[in-house]
Image (spheres, rainbow, N blue to C red):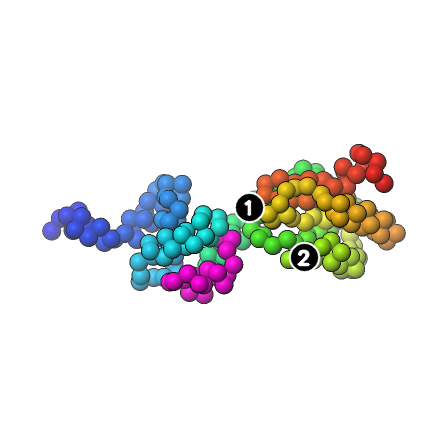
Amino acid sequence: MNNNNTDNKNPHKNHRRRLKELFLKEGLSSLPDHNVLELLLFFSIPQKDTNEIAHALLDKFGTLSSVFDADFEELCSVPGISTHSATLIKLIPQIATSYNLDKISEGADFSDLDFVGKYLVQYFMSKTNECIVVIYLDNKKNLLHISEINEGIVSMTNVNTRKIAEQAFLYNATGFIISHNHPKGRAKASKQDVGFTVDLLHTFEKLGVNLVEHIVVAGNKYKFILSDLSNLKWF
């Protein structure tokens, strides 16, 4: 029997095999968004047509990136998406972030603030909530440790400066870079960001730890707060 004729009578026959082969041959760029999701769901839904579920995800969230950025509970509300599948979906952007950070960390120079800005763009890429990250450095600006100290904050007044100090002493850091993201905003410092930066600078000067920079990140853009203050002689 001619296999091609059989496939024509049943277009869904061997669909999974064909889709996997297409990906391996041409990559994800050759696939429409619903096929990307469909392919991913093969690995959490082994014996069911995932095409309809993939379309349902795009119908609900609009775009491929919005599917990956959706809340876990919202994903689970889509018919056919189990907690297992929702976990897999949420895993993808964080794996991508870890991969990108690992790649750009090779030969990393944390004394180069533009490098740090690009590094942080990748770091925050999978973050849908506002959070604050501190990069601790030694006296040669080599990386000692990276720590998230707040997530989901609504005000800079919530920042735990005591925790920053404790970790600075724990890792014997002589300096640090602090950064926060604006997930749905612009890479622009607010008055509150500026005031917090000045307070942080003066607080840690007394402790003998240098605030190297405060960087705000939004999307693929970043802004230096402390450098701008120094240039404008605001303090």
Q: From the top left corner, tell me how far across and down residue 145 is, in percent.
A: 69, 53
| Identity of the residue drawn at 59% across and 41% down | 220
Q: From the top left corner, tell me how far across and down residue 176 is, in percent.
A: 75, 49
Q: Based on the displayed image, in which of its 4 quarters is residue 84 positioned?
A: bottom left
Residue 153, numbered circle: 2
Judge the density around disc 1: few (<14), some (14-19), many (≥20) Cα neighbours within 10 Å: some
Q: Which residues are magenta?
A: 68-87
List the residue tagged with mark 1: 100
Q: Residue 198 or 61: which is nearer the viewer?
A: 61
Q: Seen in the image, is 171 located left or right of residue 15?
A: right
The answer to if 199 sits in the magenta stretch is: no
The answer to if 74 sits in the magenta stretch is: yes
Q: Residue 188 or 68: which is nearer the viewer?
A: 188
Judge the density around disc 2: few (<14), some (14-19), many (≥20) Cα neighbours within 10 Å: some
| Identity of the residue drawn at 78% across and 49% down | 196
Q: Residue furthest bottom?
A: 83
Question: Residues under labels 1 and 2: Cα distance?
Answer: 25 Å
Residue 223 in view (yes/no): yes
Q: Residue furthest top?
A: 231
- Quarter in which the C terminus is drawn: top right
